[in-house]
Amino acid sequence: MSSSRRFPLYGWIALYVLIVGQILLFVGIEVIGYWFFPLAWWPYIVVVDGLVYRKKGRSLLTRHPREFLLLLPWSVGFWLIFELFNVVLNNWHYLMVPENIFQRWTGYAVCYATVLPGLFETTELLDAYGLFSKSRIKPISVTTRWYLPFVATGFIFFLLPLIWPQFFFPLVWGIFTFLLEPLNHRLGLRSLMREWQQGTLRSFYLLLVAGAICGLLWEFWNFWALTKWAYTVPYVAWLKVFEMPILGFLGFPPFAVTCYVMMSTVSLLRQGRSWQDPTKPYMPPRPGLTALVGIALVIFCLFGFHQIDVHTVMSWRP
């Protein structure tokens, strides 16, 4: 095996940190329990990137770290959208959150920044090992007649959870898939429906599996942490796996698809260049536009952090 295909040193270091962190948590080191979520997820992401590198000889961190870093602020922003929905849905709450606002808001950012890298690195790993590589499906006709039904479904998915949250809360995980997929297809961005028109749904399948894997890990590591979230989901709380009602695990696969579609839409700011197209040439956006988007994202994140503090945090620690 060539040196380019060996498991990289950074992967071994991350694996060591992950294992030691898990041991210290079980031993009862309190500070590890308070910060266990990022201490588990960031090493996991790096380990998975190392596995991708070992299999492909390239990965986001080794060849295209800029693309990886660009995922982080969008990851925070995307997740905060769902946190704002949760203000109405009231489906989860945070426990033992730091009273110190600098620690607290830094913790929010560090934790939420793992969402997209975790999902997409896992997707890359599944792709590297050839999952669904031979899958084919009958192509659908090349048409745009599905645009209106998709957008209408997206608006319905948006409105019903806000009007009757106790009944329609699961629909939030599919809102942006239906709202944005027609836009992505129309503008020539990465599109799952275009792949279907070409006779494959492999990306869709990979995202579903990656979402299921990440969901299981999210709940497993959250269960042991001291600073954590707990669920108050109506009707389905009678059987739990870790902290999550078992039916709630069905939300993670469509959430991964939604994140992919949302990130495809964001690639419009870079003329369609996404984390999957790191070598695609493009004209960088004007500095003014970049600054405007950055400022808007920061303001939105600060607003989202405040809403979490007010509505979602149930208990504090000094």
Image (cartoon, rainbow, N blue to C red):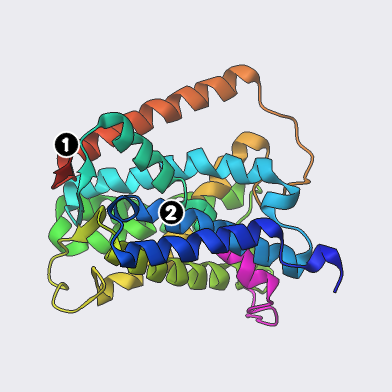
Image spot of residue 298 (x, y percent):
42, 28
Given residues 196 and 48, the one toward you in this image is 48
Q: Position of residue 143 (x, y in %)?
A: 60, 61
Q: Is residue 48 above or below residue 276?
A: below
Residue 124 highlighted magenta (yes or no): yes
**93 left or right, relative to 131:** left
At 60% from the left edge and 52% from the top edge, which residue is drawn?
185
Counting residues from the start of the chain, the first of labels 1 and 2 encountered is 2
Q: Secondary structure at mark 2?
A: helix
Residue sitting farthest toward the right = 2
Query: Where does the image place residue 11, in percent across and percent down from the top left?
Result: 64, 60
**Residue 121 seen in the current view:** no
Q: Residue at x 37, y 33 (%)?
A: 301
Crowding near the residue tagged with mark 2, few <14, some 14–19, many ≥20 C-alpha atoms within 10 Å? many
Q: Which mark is residue 146?
A: none
Q: Amino acid at mark 1?
A: Val
Residue 37 sits in quarter: bottom left
